[in-house]
Image (cartoon, rainbow, N blue to C red):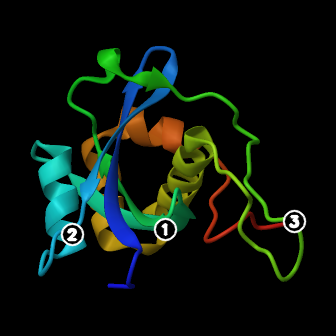
């Protein structure tokens, strides 16, 4: 750990309704000798088909480790995902991190990452086969690694 900097694990539950993709975010501080994967599983709170680490960011004096968990077992209580083109970018080549990052941008980054993994990762491909409706919505987003791939 870095002195004076806390680490938080954030788990995004990603689901689907008739209106599109949804998300809910849960977080808690990472304790001493805890593995972030275990904390993310606990925050998911259900038998997820897929749990994947998607990003990290520095926010409010702490490092936030973000995981995507899916499918959300209760997407009706979640926030509808909007802003398909929303991408968080820094102010220049030596400042890659934006001053603030909207949670929807974090979720969209995770969704783009999942869309990429569907084609490159066996676990993601198996999860996609298990929930075709959810993954059809995920696949509407341009697959991406860190950042957006430009054509």
- Seen from the viewer's position, the closer of residues 143 and 125 is 143
Pick the quarter of the image with the N terminus: bottom left
Give the Cα separation between the discs numbered 1 and 2: 13 Å
69 versus 15 height, above or below? below
Q: Residue at x 20, y 46 (%)?
A: 44
- Seen from the viewer's position, the closer of residues 10 and 136 is 10
Q: Is residue 34 left or right of residue 125?
A: left
Pick the quarter of the image with the C terminus: bottom right
Q: Residue at x 64, y 50 (%)?
A: 101
In the rendered image, residue 121, in percent from the top left (x then y), is placed at: 39, 73
> At numbered mark 2, what does the secondary structure look like: helix, strand or loop?
helix
In the rendered image, residue 36, in percent from the top left (x then y), is placed at: 23, 70
* Contact check, label 1 and label 3, Cβ < 8 Å: no
> At numbered mark 3, what does the secondary structure look like: helix, strand or loop?
loop
In the rendered structure, find residue 37 and report the number of the disc placed on it. 2
Q: Earlier in the sequence, mark 1 or mark 3?
A: 1
- Which residue is tagged 3? 91
Q: Residues within 10 Å of mark 2 (few under 14, many from 20)?
A: some
- Which residue is tagged 1? 56
- Seen from the viewer's position, the closer of residues 41 and 84 is 41
């Amino acid at each position: 750990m870095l002195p004076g900097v806390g680490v938080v694990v954030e788990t995004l539950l990603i689901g689907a309704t008739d209106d599109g993709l949804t998300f809910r975010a849960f977080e808690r501080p990472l304790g001493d000798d805890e593995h972030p994967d275990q904390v993310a599983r606990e925050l998911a709170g259900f038998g997820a088909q897929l749990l994947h680490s998607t990003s990290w960011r520095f926010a409010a004096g702490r490092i936030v480790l973000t995981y995507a968990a899916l499918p959300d077992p209760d997407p009706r209580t979640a926030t509808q995902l909007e802003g398909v083109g929303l991408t968080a970018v820094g102010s220049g080549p030596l400042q890659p991190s934006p001053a603030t990052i909207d949670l929807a941008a974090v979720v969209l980054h995770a969704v783009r990452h999942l869309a990429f993994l569907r084609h490159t990762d066996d676990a993601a491909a198996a999860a996609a086969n298990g929930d075709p409706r959810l993954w059809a919505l995920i696949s509407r987003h341009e697959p991406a690694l860190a950042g957006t791939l430009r054509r």
